[in-house]
Image (tube, rainbow, N blue to C red):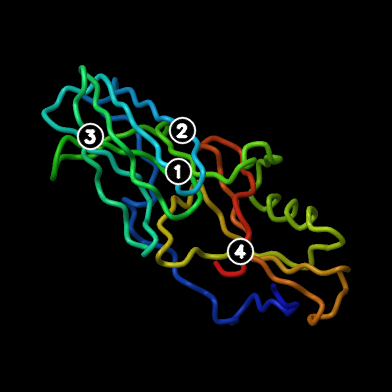
Amino acid sequence: MVTRKSIGFVGCGLLLALATAAAAVGAVKPSAPWSSARVVLGPSVVRLGQPATIAVSNVRASSLQALLLGGTDKLDKPLGWRSLRLVDGMWRGNLPTPALLGVYPIVLRTGVGAPAFGSPQWLLRVFAPGTRSQPSFADPDDVSRWWVQSVPRETLVAMKPWPFPDFDRRDRRLHRLFVVAYAPTADASPNDQLGMFVTAVRDGYQGRWRFLEATVEP
């Protein structure tokens, strides 16, 4: 159980640097000669730990590999490339399983050292049940406000964007982290305040923002 405490928004010792690997967080765009490639996921939305399959058509190559950008395992190590197999003219395989909730872009390559290619539409969504039925917002800030309002008898005291820890490689254009302080009343004393980290997720690069999770640590 979380004990009530004040949240120091400056100099509280929790500030961590943003991940700097651009390849792990950048959106990808279709590129010739692979712009006709078609990717089908089964399913495209999974629960944490649930496997997903991938089927790729319209790609002529001697081999094909898939990668979940920003995906990490339980030891916070990046998920590697997954080799696909050619079955009846279609490349098929199982995607690796990310350890964190979120939205993961998929990129492909024809072999080690070959350039990666992809589309902003190729996304694996790892959501808790009911995530897509939650209210959506144009501004990710509103996700944190909505979450506090959903806590019985609590009022938002303060909110601040927060950097993701180094090990978190999820696409920053699809994920935002906030720290919030809330209490029974807006003028409650620091001893009566609770703190929480709220992650908002965007359902696609042009999508709206929804609540992904709330945690006691970033």
| Sequence-wise first label, 2 or 4 | 2
> Tag 2: Cα neighbours inside 10 Å, few (<14), some, or many (≥20)?
some
> Tag 4: Cα neighbours inside 10 Å, few (<14), some, or many (≥20)?
few
Mark nearest the camera among 3 and 1 is 1
Q: Which residue is tagged 2?
A: 44
Judging depth in this view, the residue of 102 and 2 nearest the camera is 2
Task: Give me the disc on residue 50.
Answer: 1
Picture quadrant of residue 199: bottom right
Q: Amino acid at mark 1?
A: Gln
Q: Secondary structure at mark 3?
A: loop
Q: Amino acid at mark 4?
A: Thr
At x 40%, y 33%, the residue is 122
At x 56%, y 47%, the residue is 201
Task: Give me the disc on residue 84.
Answer: 3
> Tag 1: Cα neighbours inside 10 Å, few (<14), some, or many (≥20)?
few
Left or right, 175 with respect to 87, comes to right
Left or right, 18 with respect to 146, comes to left
Where is residue 152 drawn, in percent x and y? 84, 58
Q: CA distance from mark 4 to mark 1?
A: 21 Å
The C terminus, quarter of image: bottom right
Left or right, 59 with respect to 28, comes to left
Q: Amino acid at mark 2?
A: Ser
Q: Which residue is tagged 4?
A: 215
